[in-house]
Image (cartoon, helix red, strand yellow):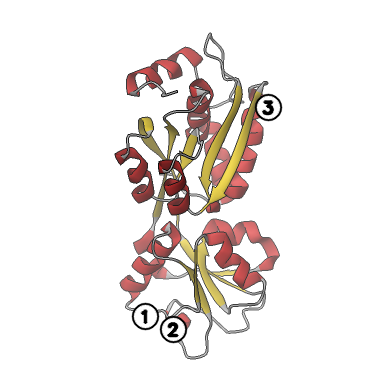
Protein backbone atom coordinates (compact mmCIF):
# COMPACT_ATOMS: atom_id res chain seq x y z
CA UNK A 1 0.00 0.00 0.00
CA UNK A 2 1.35 3.41 -0.95
CA UNK A 3 0.81 6.39 1.24
CA UNK A 4 -0.65 9.69 0.16
CA UNK A 5 1.58 12.50 -1.07
CA UNK A 6 2.52 15.79 0.54
CA UNK A 7 -0.97 17.23 0.49
CA UNK A 8 -2.43 14.16 2.13
CA UNK A 9 0.26 14.15 4.80
CA UNK A 10 -0.54 17.75 5.65
CA UNK A 11 -4.19 16.83 5.82
CA UNK A 12 -3.38 14.00 8.20
CA UNK A 13 -1.47 16.34 10.45
CA UNK A 14 -4.39 18.75 10.44
CA UNK A 15 -6.88 15.99 11.21
CA UNK A 16 -4.83 14.59 14.04
CA UNK A 17 -4.34 18.00 15.57
CA UNK A 18 -0.74 17.25 16.47
CA UNK A 19 0.41 19.85 18.94
CA UNK A 20 4.06 20.82 19.01
CA UNK A 21 4.26 20.32 22.75
CA UNK A 22 2.44 18.37 25.39
CA UNK A 23 2.32 14.64 25.87
CA UNK A 24 1.90 13.87 22.18
CA UNK A 25 -1.70 12.71 22.39
CA UNK A 26 -3.67 13.23 19.20
CA UNK A 27 -7.41 13.44 18.74
CA UNK A 28 -9.70 13.20 15.71
CA UNK A 29 -10.85 10.57 13.21
CA UNK A 30 -7.25 9.77 12.17
CA UNK A 31 -5.92 9.25 15.70
CA UNK A 32 -2.63 7.37 15.88
CA UNK A 33 -3.02 3.66 16.41
CA UNK A 34 -1.10 0.49 15.69
CA UNK A 35 2.58 -0.16 15.24
CA UNK A 36 5.17 1.86 13.37
CA UNK A 37 8.79 1.01 12.67
CA UNK A 38 11.24 3.88 13.02
CA UNK A 39 14.62 3.61 11.32
CA UNK A 40 16.93 5.89 13.32
CA UNK A 41 20.61 6.76 13.16
CA UNK A 42 22.68 4.94 15.78
CA UNK A 43 23.56 8.21 17.53
CA UNK A 44 19.86 8.72 18.31
CA UNK A 45 19.53 5.51 20.34
CA UNK A 46 19.15 6.98 23.81
CA UNK A 47 17.06 10.00 22.84
CA UNK A 48 14.68 8.09 20.58
CA UNK A 49 14.10 5.39 23.19
CA UNK A 50 12.79 8.12 25.51
CA UNK A 51 10.83 9.85 22.76
CA UNK A 52 9.18 6.59 21.73
CA UNK A 53 8.21 5.85 25.34
CA UNK A 54 6.65 9.28 25.75
CA UNK A 55 4.84 9.02 22.42
CA UNK A 56 3.33 5.65 23.32
CA UNK A 57 2.27 6.95 26.73
CA UNK A 58 0.49 9.89 25.13
CA UNK A 59 -1.11 7.75 22.44
CA UNK A 60 -2.52 4.54 23.95
CA UNK A 61 -2.77 1.77 21.38
CA UNK A 62 0.42 2.73 19.58
CA UNK A 63 3.72 0.88 19.51
CA UNK A 64 7.01 2.30 18.23
CA UNK A 65 9.56 -0.26 17.09
CA UNK A 66 13.05 1.21 16.77
CA UNK A 67 15.70 0.01 14.35
CA UNK A 68 19.12 1.61 14.83
CA UNK A 69 22.08 1.50 12.46
CA UNK A 70 24.32 3.78 10.47
CA UNK A 71 22.29 6.16 8.31
CA UNK A 72 23.82 4.85 5.09
CA UNK A 73 22.81 1.28 5.96
CA UNK A 74 19.30 2.38 6.92
CA UNK A 75 18.80 4.32 3.70
CA UNK A 76 19.93 1.30 1.68
CA UNK A 77 17.54 -0.97 3.56
CA UNK A 78 14.60 1.36 2.91
CA UNK A 79 15.42 1.64 -0.80
CA UNK A 80 15.65 -2.15 -1.00
CA UNK A 81 12.16 -2.48 0.48
CA UNK A 82 12.67 -2.93 4.21
CA UNK A 83 9.43 -2.05 6.08
CA UNK A 84 9.90 1.38 7.65
CA UNK A 85 7.36 4.03 8.60
CA UNK A 86 9.76 6.81 9.66
CA UNK A 87 13.40 7.55 8.81
CA UNK A 88 15.55 9.73 11.08
CA UNK A 89 18.93 10.24 9.45
CA UNK A 90 22.13 11.67 10.91
CA UNK A 91 22.71 13.59 7.70
CA UNK A 92 20.89 15.14 4.78
CA UNK A 93 22.81 13.10 2.18
CA UNK A 94 21.22 9.79 3.14
CA UNK A 95 17.78 11.36 3.52
CA UNK A 96 18.21 12.71 -0.01
CA UNK A 97 18.71 9.15 -1.25
CA UNK A 98 15.24 8.03 -0.22
CA UNK A 99 13.72 11.34 -1.29
CA UNK A 100 15.23 10.76 -4.71
CA UNK A 101 13.59 7.32 -4.84
CA UNK A 102 10.18 8.82 -4.11
CA UNK A 103 9.98 7.07 -0.76
CA UNK A 104 9.18 10.08 1.46
CA UNK A 105 5.69 11.31 2.27
CA UNK A 106 5.75 15.09 2.02
CA UNK A 107 9.05 16.70 2.97
CA UNK A 108 11.75 15.87 5.49
CA UNK A 109 12.17 18.17 8.50
CA UNK A 110 15.47 19.04 10.19
CA UNK A 111 15.11 18.36 13.92
CA UNK A 112 18.58 18.36 15.50
CA UNK A 113 22.27 19.02 15.07
CA UNK A 114 25.35 17.36 16.50
CA UNK A 115 29.09 17.95 16.66
CA UNK A 116 32.10 15.70 16.99
CA UNK A 117 34.19 15.13 20.09
CA UNK A 118 37.19 12.93 20.74
CA UNK A 119 36.32 10.01 23.01
CA UNK A 120 39.16 8.60 25.10
CA UNK A 121 39.29 5.99 27.88
CA UNK A 122 38.99 7.24 31.48
CA UNK A 123 42.16 9.05 32.50
CA UNK A 124 43.07 9.73 28.86
CA UNK A 125 46.19 7.50 28.98
CA UNK A 126 47.43 8.64 25.56
CA UNK A 127 47.24 12.29 26.61
CA UNK A 128 45.05 13.39 23.71
CA UNK A 129 44.41 17.14 23.87
CA UNK A 130 43.85 18.19 20.24
CA UNK A 131 42.75 16.75 16.92
CA UNK A 132 46.38 16.85 15.76
CA UNK A 133 47.32 14.52 18.64
CA UNK A 134 45.36 11.77 16.89
CA UNK A 135 47.98 11.74 14.15
CA UNK A 136 50.89 11.26 16.56
CA UNK A 137 53.00 8.10 16.14
CA UNK A 138 51.74 5.16 18.18
CA UNK A 139 48.25 6.57 18.79
CA UNK A 140 45.51 4.12 17.76
CA UNK A 141 42.46 5.91 16.42
CA UNK A 142 39.07 4.60 15.31
CA UNK A 143 36.63 6.58 13.14
CA UNK A 144 33.43 5.99 11.23
CA UNK A 145 33.63 4.97 7.58
CA UNK A 146 33.46 7.96 5.20
CA UNK A 147 30.01 7.00 3.87
CA UNK A 148 28.56 7.19 7.39
CA UNK A 149 27.59 10.69 8.64
CA UNK A 150 30.05 10.64 11.55
CA UNK A 151 32.73 9.52 9.10
CA UNK A 152 31.97 12.32 6.66
CA UNK A 153 32.10 14.76 9.57
CA UNK A 154 35.45 13.33 10.66
CA UNK A 155 36.86 13.83 7.17
CA UNK A 156 35.61 17.42 7.12
CA UNK A 157 37.07 18.18 10.54
CA UNK A 158 40.44 16.65 9.67
CA UNK A 159 40.53 18.63 6.44
CA UNK A 160 39.72 21.84 8.30
CA UNK A 161 42.59 21.21 10.70
CA UNK A 162 45.05 20.05 8.08
CA UNK A 163 45.38 16.75 9.93
CA UNK A 164 45.95 13.40 8.22
CA UNK A 165 44.38 10.58 10.20
CA UNK A 166 45.41 6.94 9.81
CA UNK A 167 42.73 5.03 11.73
CA UNK A 168 43.21 1.41 12.68
CA UNK A 169 39.60 0.77 11.68
CA UNK A 170 36.62 2.49 10.09
CA UNK A 171 33.28 1.47 11.59
CA UNK A 172 29.78 1.42 10.13
CA UNK A 173 28.22 3.33 13.03
CA UNK A 174 29.26 5.78 15.71
CA UNK A 175 28.31 3.32 18.45
CA UNK A 176 30.82 0.84 17.04
CA UNK A 177 33.54 3.50 17.27
CA UNK A 178 32.60 4.17 20.88
CA UNK A 179 32.69 0.44 21.59
CA UNK A 180 36.27 0.21 20.36
CA UNK A 181 37.28 2.94 22.81
CA UNK A 182 35.36 1.59 25.81
CA UNK A 183 36.74 -1.92 25.24
CA UNK A 184 40.33 -0.64 25.21
CA UNK A 185 40.95 -1.43 21.54
CA UNK A 186 41.73 2.21 20.70
CA UNK A 187 43.37 5.19 22.35
CA UNK A 188 40.74 7.51 20.90
CA UNK A 189 37.74 7.66 18.60
CA UNK A 190 35.86 10.41 16.81
CA UNK A 191 32.24 10.29 17.91
CA UNK A 192 29.44 12.76 18.60
CA UNK A 193 29.20 14.91 21.71
CA UNK A 194 25.93 13.12 22.50
CA UNK A 195 27.66 9.72 22.45
CA UNK A 196 30.27 10.87 24.95
CA UNK A 197 27.53 12.22 27.19
CA UNK A 198 25.48 9.02 26.96
CA UNK A 199 28.51 6.86 27.77
CA UNK A 200 28.85 8.45 31.19
CA UNK A 201 32.00 7.42 33.03
CA UNK A 202 32.96 4.83 30.41
CA UNK A 203 34.81 7.48 28.38
CA UNK A 204 36.04 11.06 28.61
CA UNK A 205 35.42 13.69 25.96
CA UNK A 206 38.03 15.99 24.45
CA UNK A 207 36.50 18.95 22.56
CA UNK A 208 38.40 20.32 19.57
CA UNK A 209 37.99 23.52 17.56
CA UNK A 210 37.81 21.86 14.16
CA UNK A 211 34.49 20.24 15.06
CA UNK A 212 32.81 23.54 14.19
CA UNK A 213 33.61 22.83 10.54
CA UNK A 214 31.66 19.57 10.63
CA UNK A 215 28.28 20.18 12.24
CA UNK A 216 25.84 17.38 11.41
CA UNK A 217 22.16 18.11 10.70
CA UNK A 218 19.52 15.44 11.35
CA UNK A 219 16.37 15.27 9.18
CA UNK A 220 13.29 13.10 9.77
CA UNK A 221 10.46 12.07 7.47
CA UNK A 222 7.56 9.66 7.15
CA UNK A 223 8.34 6.86 4.70
CA UNK A 224 5.90 6.14 1.90
CA UNK A 225 4.29 2.72 1.86
CA UNK A 226 3.59 1.84 5.51
CA UNK A 227 0.30 0.79 7.02
CA UNK A 228 -0.09 3.50 9.69
CA UNK A 229 0.42 6.89 8.01
CA UNK A 230 -1.42 8.85 10.71
CA UNK A 231 0.79 7.38 13.40
CA UNK A 232 3.95 7.98 11.38
CA UNK A 233 2.96 11.60 10.77
CA UNK A 234 2.12 12.07 14.45
CA UNK A 235 5.48 10.63 15.50
CA UNK A 236 7.36 12.99 13.17
CA UNK A 237 5.37 15.90 14.62
CA UNK A 238 6.17 14.74 18.14
CA UNK A 239 9.91 14.51 17.46
CA UNK A 240 10.01 17.97 15.91
CA UNK A 241 7.76 19.53 18.56
CA UNK A 242 8.43 20.79 22.06
CA UNK A 243 8.36 17.39 23.77
CA UNK A 244 10.85 15.85 21.37
CA UNK A 245 13.02 18.95 21.52
CA UNK A 246 13.21 18.69 25.31
CA UNK A 247 14.50 15.12 25.13
CA UNK A 248 17.01 15.99 22.42
CA UNK A 249 18.25 19.01 24.36
CA UNK A 250 18.80 16.88 27.45
CA UNK A 251 20.77 14.38 25.36
CA UNK A 252 23.09 17.11 24.10
CA UNK A 253 21.74 17.64 20.60
CA UNK A 254 21.65 21.17 19.23
CA UNK A 255 18.67 22.85 17.61
CA UNK A 256 18.43 22.64 13.81
Which numbered circle lies on residue 10? none
The vertical placement of 207 against 36, above or below, is below
Q: Residue at x 50, y 62 (%)?
A: 172
Element under disc 3: helix
Q: Residue furthest left?
A: 100
The residue where tag 1 is placed is 164
Secondary element at tag 1:
loop
Q: Quadrant of residue 99?
A: top left
The residues bearing labels 2 and 3 have C-alpha atoms spaced at a distance of 48 Å
Quarter of the rendering containing residue 59: top right
Q: Classify the position of the C terminus by image quarter.
A: top left
Which one is in front, 171 or 51? 171
Residue, disc 2: 135
Of the numbered discs 1 and 3, the one sitting upstream in the chain is: 3
Residue tagged 3: 57
Place of residue 7 in the rendered image (x, y in percent of width and height, measured from the top left): 33, 19
Q: Residues within 10 Å of mark 3 (few under 14, many from 20)?
A: some
Q: Does 217 sit above or below residue 235? A: below
> How far apart are the two marked residues, 2 and 1, measured between alpha carbons?
6 Å
Residue 81 versus residue 94: which sits nearer the camera? 81
Q: Residue at x 56, y 13 (%)?
A: 27
Q: CA distance from mark 1 to mark 3?
A: 48 Å
Report the residue at 63% width, 56% height from top: 198
> How many tags in the picture?
3
> Residue at the bottom extreme?
137
In the shown orientation, is residue 169 left or right of residue 110?
Answer: right
Amino acid sequence: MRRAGAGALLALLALTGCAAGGAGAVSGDASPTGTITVFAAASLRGAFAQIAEQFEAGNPGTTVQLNYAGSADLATQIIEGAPADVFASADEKNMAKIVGEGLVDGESVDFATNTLEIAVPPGNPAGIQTLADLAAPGVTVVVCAPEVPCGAASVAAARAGGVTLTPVSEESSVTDVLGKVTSGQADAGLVYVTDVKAAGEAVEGVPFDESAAAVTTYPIAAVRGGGAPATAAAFVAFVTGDAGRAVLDAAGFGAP
